[in-house]
Image: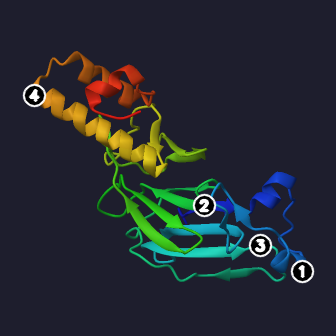
Amino acid sequence: VYHSSCLVLTPEHVRKGTKLNIYKSLGKLEEEEVDNSIGRDNFEIKYEGIYIFGGLNENLEETNNFFILHCFRNPLVFFEPKIKGTPPSPRCMTSMSFNEILNFITIYGGKDSRQVFGDLFILDIMNFQWFKIDLFGPDGISGRMGHCAGIVKEKLYIFGGCDEDNKYPSAKVLCVELDLLRNKKLSKIYDFAKSALNQNAKDKTAKNVMQLLKEGAEIPHDIYPFLQLDE
C-alpha cells in the first residue's frame, strides 16, 4: 500500500493511442517488430508496462522494492528487474513520473517512520540504473509526501502534499528542470547571484535574478553580461 506507479509505453503506442488489453498477448509482433525508439536521442524501452516503487509491505514496513507489471503478455508477467546504482531509501507516499523525452522515471519525496524526504532520484530505464539528483532553489527544497507530480516536456512539476508536521505546504507549484545542460546553466546563474547578494544584499540585479529563478521565468539576455554567461 501507499506505493507509487506509472505507465511506461513506447511512442509507437502513445501516438497510435493503443488500447491496452492486459489479458491478451499481442504475440510475436509485439516482441520483435514494434519500433521501440523514443525521444530525441533514439533511446529504447526494454519493458512496457506498469512500473511500481516502494510503499508499505504486509508488515506495514517501508520498502524500496521496484517491480514491473509487463503488459502485452498472457499471462501477465510481474517481476523485479536488476537495477544498478544506489536506490532511494525505503519509503512510501512518493511521486513517480515517466519522462518520454529523456527516457527516465523520476521518484520524488515520500516518507518513512522518521522523516519526510525532499530528494529526487532518476531511473534510467534503458540501462536500468539509479541516479540521485542534487536540487537547489532560492527558497530551498522542503520535503513532501502524498503530493502530485507530472512531467511536461523537460520539466517536473510538483504540487501539494504534506510536510513533516503533516501540514499542507504552500500551494505554489515546484518546478524542477530536468534538462542537464539547462540545469547546469541555471545552477551557475544561481551561484553567481547568491554570491553577489552575499557581497551586497541590496544588489538590485542579483535580487531580480533570484526572483526570476524563484518564479521559474526565463533570464533576460541583457542580464547575461552581469552573470558572466555566454549566450
Q: Which residue is mark 3?
A: 71
Which of discs 1 and 2 lies nearer the camera? The answer is 2
Q: Nearer the viewer, mark 1 or mark 3?
A: 1
Mark 4: amino acid: Gln
Identify the element where label 3 is drawn: loop
Mark 3 burial class by Cα count in 10 Å: few <14, some 14-19, many 20+: many
Q: Secondary structure at mark 2?
A: loop
Whether the residues at callouts 1 and 4 have beta carbons within 8 Å, the answer is: no
Pointer 4 residue: 199
Q: Which mark is on residue 103?
A: 2
The answer to whether residue 112 shows anywhere in this view is yes
Q: Position of residue 46 (x, y in %)?
A: 67, 74
Q: From the image, tell me which residue sits under label 1.
A: 27
In the image, 147 versus 20, the foreground residue is 20
- Classify mark 4: residues with Cα within 10 Å, few (<14), some (14-19) or many (20+): few
Which of the marked residues, 1 or 3, is nearer the chain's N terminus? 1
Please tell me which residue is depicted at 89% across the width and 77% down the height of the picture: 29
Which amino acid lies under the numbered mark 1 shown in the image of this protein?
Answer: Gly
